[in-house]
């Protein structure tokens, strides 16, 4: 039996984390979560099983744009795809996320079928 993919959710809103974890679990994924980009980087350092990161873009302290660049520059986990998951859905936001290094962009509220397709395509 194939091992479930491990998804890291980085979001400063616990309600978003709860909903995403539940949705991913119902689709056979395991997940870790945290409330800040810095904590997410620490989890990536400690857990080599993480296969994909779902990154909220608007967070206090280090935002998702900066965190994506840090992840991409890492020799240890720079290969892990990061999916921007954000409420920012204005014209140009998708491009800004992709320019920062996100592999894909999913606007909130999340279309779960779209998110699962993107996870499958990028991991």
Image: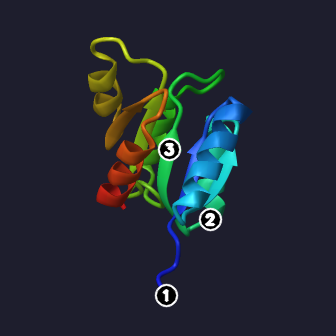
Per the image, the residue denoted by label 3 is: 54
Q: Dot 3: few (<14), some (14–19), or many (≥20) neighbours within 10 Å? A: many
**Residue 13 relative to residue 104: left or right:** right
Up the image or down, 53 lies above or below 97; here it is below
In the image, what residue occupies the spot 43% across and 58% down?
75
Of residues 56 and 78, which is closer to you in this image? Answer: 56
Per the image, the residue denoted by label 2 is: 47
What's the mark number on residue 1? Answer: 1
Report, in whole angstroms, how far the alpha carbon at label 1 lies from the one at label 3.
25 Å
- If you read the primary sequence from the N terminus, does the residue marked by circle 2 or circle 1 appear first? 1
* Circles 1, 3 touching at the beta carbon (< 8 Å): no
Q: Nearer the viewer, mark 2 or mark 1?
A: 1
How many numbered discs sit on the rendered protein? Answer: 3
In percent of width and height, residue 66 lies at 48, 30
In percent of width and height, residue 109 lies at 49, 27
What's the mark number on residue 91? Answer: none
In the image, what residue occupies the spot 51% across and 36% down?
67
**Residue 81 relative to residue 86: left or right:** left
Up the image or down, 110 lies above or below 6; here it is above
Is residue 7 visible to the viewer in this orientation of the structure?
Answer: yes
Mark 1, secondary structure of its residue: loop
Is residue 69 visible to the viewer in this orientation of the structure?
Answer: no
Q: Quadrant of the C terminus?
A: bottom left
- If you read the primary sequence from the N terminus, does the residue marked by circle 3 or circle 2 appear first? 2
Of residues 75 and 111, which is closer to you in this image? Answer: 111
């Amino acid at each position: 039996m194939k091992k479930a993919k491990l998804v890291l959710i980085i979001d400063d809103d616990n309600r978003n984390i709860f909903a995403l974890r539940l949705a991913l679990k119902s689709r056979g994924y395991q997940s870790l979560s945290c409330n800040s980009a810095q904590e997410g980087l620490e989890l990536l350092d400690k857990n080599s099983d993480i296969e994909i990161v779902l990154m909220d873009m608007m967070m206090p302290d280090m935002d998702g744009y900066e965190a994506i660049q840090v992840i991409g520059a890492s020799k240890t986990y720079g290969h892990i795809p990061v999916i921007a998951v954000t409420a920012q859905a204005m014209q140009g936001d998708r491009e800004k996320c992709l320019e920062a290094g996100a592999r894909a962009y999913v606007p909130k509220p999340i279309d779960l079928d779209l998110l699962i397709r993107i996870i499958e395509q990028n991991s």
